[in-house]
Amino acid sequence: MSDRAFKQAAQLLRQSRKTVALTGAGVSTESGIPDFRSRDGLWARFDPMEYGTLDAFRRDPAKVWQMLAELIGLADARPNAGHRAMSLLEQHGFLQGIITQNIDGLHQQAGSRRVVEFHGSLQSFSCPACGKGYVLEDIRRQAMPPRCTVCAAILKPDVVFFDEQIPPTALREAEELLAGADLLLVAGTSCQVAPAAYLPDMVLSRGGVLIEINPAPVLAGAAVVLAGGFSEMMERLVEELAIPGG
Ligand SMILES: [Zn+2]
């Protein structure tokens, strides 16, 4: 990657009135969380129709927990240097918030404050029968599949299954965050899944610009492309912006 691209990206971040980041699986792979959609990812081993839908969960929650138990193991992951660099951007006023397709909570762990989770979170769980809420620590203390301590129903993670809609609150928060945004920093996602797929065009159509960070860039219309791994690209960007602690 040429220094020129980082200088251009830093310049766009300095000039922007409001910058929002859109992130996906690629920002968490360096934290040891494989892309679920990759060739040997989660969905290659568990048929999404049998393990990834609310319909399947209602039919046989214990079976779906065979897949969820593996996801819970991933919740031990730690934020990487890229997550930390992105939280520095927010702290120093270069970024107003993040919209993520990830359920791992790593942006928040890294210190990012405003994070919209399109696909929910693996940090919280609810009882489908009585509605009682649980946190990840409660689940870890239980045998699989974990059950409600009040009514004994099998618990459901607060993640969005394939046959579920994006939560209306997440959509509203994303709209609020994107209102007036003139720069979208896209990282670790090829933006193929709705609604994230529409966001780059939305920002472009309002006269905004895109910066893309992906090892194999795919976005049409990006003003600057940083082709490489998330951590390295973000660290070099923070360096270029001369942010202390970066
Ligand atoms: Zn219950």
Image (tube, helix red, strand yellow):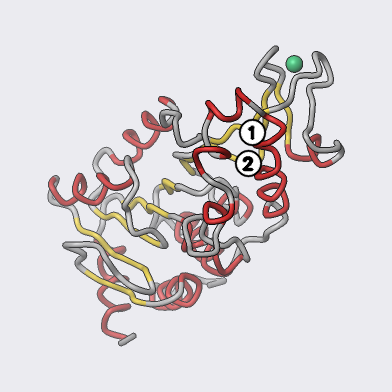
Q: Quadrant of the N terminus?
A: bottom left
From the top left corner, tell me how far across and down residue 150 is, in percent. 82, 15
Above or below: residue 158 compared with residue 29: above
Determine the residue positioned at 41% across, 46% down.
99
- Amino acid type, label 1: Pro
The quarter holding residue 195 reads top left
Number of disc labels: 2
Work out whether residue 246 or residue 67 is closer to the camera in this orientation and state it: 67
147 and 215: which one is in front?
147
Task: Determine which quarter of the picture holds residue 171.
Answer: top left
Q: Which one is nearer the viewer's eye here, 220 or 181?
A: 220
Mark 2 neighbour class, 10 Å CA radius: few under 14, some 14 to 19, many 20 or more: many
User: Dot 2 lies on which element?
Assistant: strand
Would you identify the image quadrant in which residue 172 lies? top left
Q: Measuring 25% from the left and 75% from the top, which residue is drawn there?
A: 8
Q: Residues within 10 Å of mark 1 (few under 14, many from 20)?
A: many
Q: Is residue 241 left or right of residue 63?
A: left
* Three-letter code, disc 2: Leu
Q: Is residue 207 above or below residue 143?
A: below
Ligand 1: image quarter: top right
Residue wearing tag 1: 157
Residue 193, image x, y percentages: 34, 47
Where residue 115 appears, as percent x and y from the top left, is: 49, 44
Residue at the limit of the structure toward the bottom, as seen here = 2
Residue under the image location 24 percent in, 51 percent down = 200
Residue identifier under label 2? 122
